[in-house]
Amino acid sequence: MAGKGKNQFVENLKKGFEDIQVVLQEGTVKLFAKQIVVIVLMFFVLRYANGKFEEKNAAARKQISAIDIQKKSEQDYMDSKNKLISLEPQFPDIEQKNEWLLSHILGFYKEANVTPQMEGGQAESDANPSYLLTTQKVGATMSYIQLGKFLEMIENAKDYVRISSVDIVKNTSPESVGENKVSMIFNTIFPKEKVGAKLFSNYNELVEQQRSKEDNQ
């Protein structure tokens, strides 16, 4: 590319000198011959320089565009990585599917100082190819105030446990005024495969950093 540009520059100069020679041979502008030489030379030099400038300018624009695309790709990657590190640890490992949800349910009721009663066994559905859905129906006796605080505790839990159904039956016996029989269905999702640990060799360290960052916000 550089050799081609150099040859073009030489050809432009040759053509310029040929034009000057024609003018001098006609003898019409001898007094301005030196000025003409300078002007013609500058014309071709500037023409050549402008061409190279546009070429370099176009190359610079392409480089800037490539850098912008790269930055956007890097930002998209970092956003996806941070989202994965933030969300994936909230879901339990599928190896723990037999006791994880049950132990969390018992922990919630213990913290609320309410006695739970399991209604049936734990149910599972693997209809989704990516995760296993596990549910457990639990009954208890609560006041409306207790129920409100209990639901708030579930929603604010870091680990992924959700309630999909709440049935409330008011207790009408005189000795149980203000109490209700509350039946809830608890749900969690077990990913069939967690990809974070496979993607990042320092996965556990990244998780701890992300949790510390979230705790400080």
Image (cartoon, helix red, strand yellow):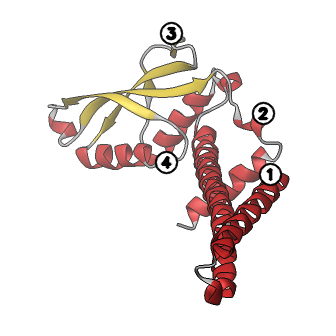
Cα separation, mark 4 vs mark 2, equals: 35 Å
In three-dimensional space, the C-alpha distance between marks 1 and 4, rounded to whole angstroms, equals: 81 Å
For mark 4, give the secondary structure: helix
- Compared with 108, 68 (above or below) is below
> Closer to the N terminus: mark 3 or mark 1?
1
Q: Is residue 76 left or right of residue 142?
A: right
Q: N-terminal of the two: label 4 or label 2?
A: 4
Give the crowd class for mark 1: few <14, some 14-19, many >=20 residues within 10 Å: few
Say what amino acid the circle numbered 2 marks.
Answer: Lys
Say which of marks 3 and 1 sits in front: 1
Of labels 2 and 3, earlier in sequence is 3
Q: Name the residue under label 2.
A: 198
Give the residue displayed 57% in from the left and 59% down from the top.
Answer: 214
**Residue 72: x %, y % from top left:** 58, 51
Q: Which of marks 1 and 2 is nearer the N terminus?
A: 1
Mark 4 vs mark 3: in front: 3
Classify 10 Å Cα crowding around label 4: few (below 14), some (14-19), many (20 and above). few
In this rendered view, identify the residue nearer to me: 141 or 174: 141
- Residue 4 has which mark? 1
Q: Which of marks 4 and 2 is in front?
A: 2
Frontmost residue, 31 versus 193: 31
- Residue kind at label 3, given as amino acid type: Ala
How far apart, in angstroms, are the residues tagged by discs 3 and 1?
66 Å
Q: Gap in Å between the C-alphas at discs 4 and 3?
A: 33 Å
Where does residue 3 sit, x and y in percent of width and height? 85, 54
Residue highlighted by disc 3: 127
The amino acid type of the residue labelled 1 equals Lys
Instruction: Tell me the residue that label 4 is attached to.
Output: 111
**Residue drawn at the location 62% of the way across and 57% of the way down:** 58
Mark 4 and mark 3 in contact? Answer it, CB < 8 Å: no
Where residue 11 sits in the image (x, y, percent)? Answer: 76, 58
